[in-house]
Each structure stands twice: as C-alpha cells, then as structure tokens.
Image (cartoon, rainbow, N blue to C red):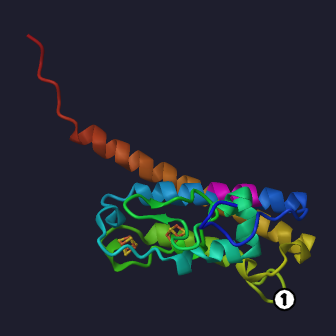
Amino acid sequence: MKPGTLIGAADTKAFSEQLYRIREIHIEVEAILQSLAALQDDVPCARCTSVCCREVMCRESVDSDFLRFVLGPRVEDYEVNDGWHVPGSGCRLGYGRPLVCYEFFCERFDAQDAAQLRQLSRAFKTLYADVFAGRHMLAVADIRRITANKLDRIHNRLETLRERANAALRRSLGEKLGLQATSRPVDPPGD
Ligand code: SF4
Ligand code: SF4
C-alpha cells in the first residue's frame, strides 16, 4: 500500500457471474452518464471556484461493498486526505463513483438542459433500491448475500437503463453535430 492511500486492500472475495455482469453494465452506464454530462453546452464544473467534491463524499466508494467490488484493485489508490479529487483536474475515477456524484444537483446546472441527465441519474440510483433486507445496493454489507432473483432484476433494469442512456447520448451527439454543421462557415464559391 502506498503512503497516504487506503485503509485496506482490494477485496479478494469470490463473486458470482451475475455480479460480474452487473458490474460490467454499471461501468458502461457510468461512462454514458459522464459523456452526456460532458456534452452539456456549458459544463459549469470546468470553471467552478467552489468545487463540491469532498473526501467525505468520495468515501462511499470505498465504504460500500458494491462500490468496492466495482472499483476492484483501484480501491488501493484511494487517498485518505483527498479521496479521488485532484485540485485543478477533478475526479480521478472513471468508474465506481458514489451515485450521488451523478445527481447534478448543483444549481449551476439549472441553466443547462439537464433534465434528462438528472432523470437517468435518478433511475440509476433507484434501480438498486430494496435489493436485500430493504436496503439499497450501496448499503448492503455483503453483496454476495443478494438472491439470484434480485440480481436478475437488477441486471434487467440496468440493461434497460443502458439502452435509454445510449439513446439519449446518440440524440445529444446528433444535435451537437447538427449544430456544428449549421454553424460552420460556408466556403466561398471558387474562382
Ligand atoms: S457540481 Fe456545481 S459546485 Fe460542484 S464542481 Fe460542478 S459547478 Fe462546482
Ligand atoms: S466526483 Fe469523484 S472526486 Fe468528486 S466526490 Fe465523486 S468520487 Fe469524489
């Protein structure tokens, strides 16, 4: 373990195939949500002077059994003082972020057309509700105890969400490209 990093090594527990499939789609959905956020016309975080990331927020990624599983060996790179945040460049995590990091609750996003992004993020969080003893996936102490039926349900919901999010990403990209095409200066007629 490097000095200043975590807290404990990556888990060496054996997880089911179902959980690995869920992990794979979960990471894909995170990537799509991040791409959608980056496509906002004016991403406020880029010039924010009061960045909301705090170690106390990052910490869920290493406290939650599910997020530790999603992170895998990356969990060992966690910095005890700064979590995943690097001043000036942002979050070091491409996947395994706490779901609160996808809520875009900041009022500076209100000027953006972020409604769809927020809906998808909310769906991402709620599909993991009530998976074991009434608990949310991120609050289950040992995700290996979740039944196969519940894992199936999560898997199906994740697949549906991935389709929705992909469709939204295709639409956003299409709109961007359409806008860029119409704003490109027209070449003057040749001599
Ligand atoms: S979400 Fe809001 S407060 Fe947080 S970094 Fe972005 S602009 Fe700043
Ligand atoms: S976005 Fe990254 S750095 Fe910011 S609170 Fe979430 S995990 Fe931490």
Q: Report the front residue among 67 and 33.
A: 67
Q: Is residue 183 above or below residue 142?
A: above
Q: Quadrant of residue 64?
A: bottom right
| Type of amino acid at the residue the image marks with label 1 | Ala
Q: Is residue 55 above or below residue 70?
A: below
The residue segment tinted magenta is: 23-28
Q: Quadrant of residue 107?
A: bottom left
Say if the magenta span includes residue 27.
yes
Q: Residue 89: percent from the left, percent from the top?
A: 41, 58
Say if the magenta span includes residue 107.
no
Q: Residue 52: percent from the left, percent from the top?
A: 41, 76
Q: Residue at x 29, y 38 (%)?
A: 181
Tell me the residue that label 1 is attached to. 133
Q: Residue at x 85, y 67 (%)?
A: 152
As drawn, which residue projects farthest toward the left?
Answer: 191
- Drawn side of residue 38 relative to residue 28, left or right: left
- Quadrant the C terminus occupies: top left
Q: Residue 41: percent from the left, percent from the top?
A: 32, 58
As drawn, which residue projects farthest toward the front?
Answer: 3
Q: Report the front residue among 82 and 109.
A: 82
As drawn, which residue projects farthest toward the bottom?
Answer: 134
- Quadrant the N terminus occupies: bottom right
Q: Residues within 10 Å of mark 1 (few under 14, many from 20)?
A: few
Secondary structure under tag 1 reads loop
